[in-house]
Image (cartoon, helix red, strand yellow):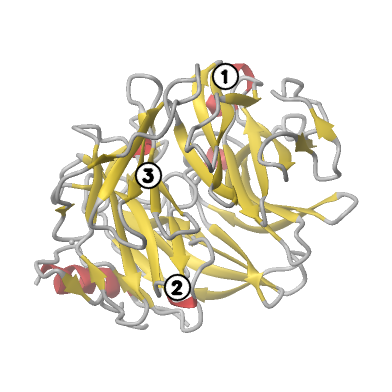
Amino acid sequence: MRFRSGAGDRWCRRVTSALLLAAAPAIAGEKLVKQGEPRRIAGYRGIWFDLGQRSEFGSKYSGGLGTYTAKHRPLAVHAPEAGKTFFVYGGTTAKHERHLLAMVSYYDHRTRMVPQPVVVHDKQGVDDPHDNPSLQIDSAGHLWVFVSGRGRKRPGHVYRSARPHDITSFEHVAEREFTYPQPWWVAEGKALLLFTKYTGGRELYWSTRDAATGTWSRDRKLAAMGGHYQVSNERDGRVITAFNRHPEGDVDRRTNLYFLQSDDGGKSWRTAAGVLVETPVVDPAGAALVRDYRAEGRLVYMKDIGFDADGRPVILYLTSASHLPGPAGAPRTWTLAHWTGGRWAFREVTNSGHNYDTGSLDLESDGMWRIIGPTEPGPQRHGCGGEIAVWVSHDQGRSWEKTRELTHGSSSNHGYVRRPRHAHPGFDAFWADGNPDALSESRLYFTDRDSGEVRCLPYDMPEPLAEPPLLPRR
């Protein structure tokens, strides 16, 4: 089933135009500073960004990056008791402006409506989506928003909703040094926060929150091999993380694949085989290594990670021949690493056009594995993103079939497809679009798992509530 999103996203435009401190001592305790009345934006307007590192085939990455990066996790959480999927994204103030706002909203599955989104944090002129937020919901239903920082000059911020399952009021909890926040609840009231600090390159850290006192531990270093990017996930208190390595701190040479896990809230870290690993990891050839892609001359771009039906890790990543956009990087191969119980099995899914084509992995449904991502060529051929497709495997990743193209004939590339935690079929994945070649509007979309229908979150939303319009089917 396909959607004519070329007409679709243009039609959507017509319809909607008619919405922790730096590491040192532990924080003495959370200081809840209540914010004023919520600031709402009359529409869902994603942030547009250009990194500025250009070649003959365009920017290293650019376009609509409201759901950027893959290392901000999770961006959405389904709350069945509220009947809503809550989500965060990097928004902006108005059309064609690049003023970053950390936004929060929800989709009500009963009414099929969305409210005008709320500004949790104004980045005060920052236009960089590396400062986008991530989201978690605690056992009491409070929303926790972790607004990323960027080194020590732009600290991160932690917010908690004043009331359960409510976006109208947030309390400022903490200011910390963290980038790429990945918070997970590992026990009643206890959180494990994975994040990055710009110490010896982009090094990986973690911190834990004590349930009784609300204090956060000192930041502890997880990996220090010149720098890293990671993706992580959690199930039943067990946190898994996969990461690459930046030799000599050079992100353009990112390579290798590593894996660690903890089932005791970060007290210890082990390999998939259960081998205890001393942290921080400093040996590139140590026990945490899954595959030595440097020896193969391949770069590694992290995309997603999840658990199979038996609780074994599955890692989604893309390998490339070059950090530059254009033909030099081909083939860019979407790849899975699956721990089978005694070894890592590697499976290739498909090829893609850009290193930063990013999608999500679904391993939760009836033994069927699914990948949703911009694997198809888009209107901006060499730019980040493309058209969104669904790939399905019925044999644990050994073979793959493209079963749907969710967008087709679009006017701008779609990218950074993100799957909510505990995803509801009615809000199975969401993403943003945007022209990677020139400053443009950026809109947000989500899809229904069963029907394949795609809805566009209204860009202009004068009323408090609106039903996101469906893109016409092709």
Q: Is residue 434 above or below residue 128?
A: below
Q: Given this view, does label 2 or label 3 mark the residue nearer the observer? A: 2
Tags 2 and 3 touching, CB below 8 Å: no
Q: Secondary structure beneath disc 1?
A: helix
Give x and y (percent) for residue 135: 42, 51
Query: Which quadrant holds the C terminus?
Result: bottom left
Answer with mark 1 or mark 3, whichever residue precedes in sequence.
3
Query: Residue 331: in sight, yes or no?
Result: no
Q: Amino acid at mark 2?
A: Glu
Give x and y (percent) for residue 316: 64, 52
Q: Which image quadrant is residue 111 in?
A: bottom left
Give x and y (percent) for residue 141: 42, 60
**Between marks 2 and 1, how big is the CA–CA gap?**
45 Å
Q: Secondary structure beneath disc 2?
A: loop
- The residue carrying mark 2 is 81
Q: Amino acid at mark 3?
A: Pro
Q: Please state which of residues 56 and 105 is positioned toward the viewer in this rendering.
A: 105
Q: Is residue 25 above or below residue 429?
A: above
Is 350 left, or right, of 276 in this rendering? left
**Between marks 2 and 3, how big is the CA–CA gap?**
23 Å
Name the disc covering residue 133, or none.
3
Q: Given this view, does label 2 or label 1 mark the residue nearer the observer? A: 2
- The residue carrying mark 1 is 249
Q: Please state which of residues 226 and 262 is positioned toward the viewer in this rendering.
A: 262
Q: Residue at x 13, y 60 (%)?
A: 42
Is 326 left, or right, of 119 in this rendering? right
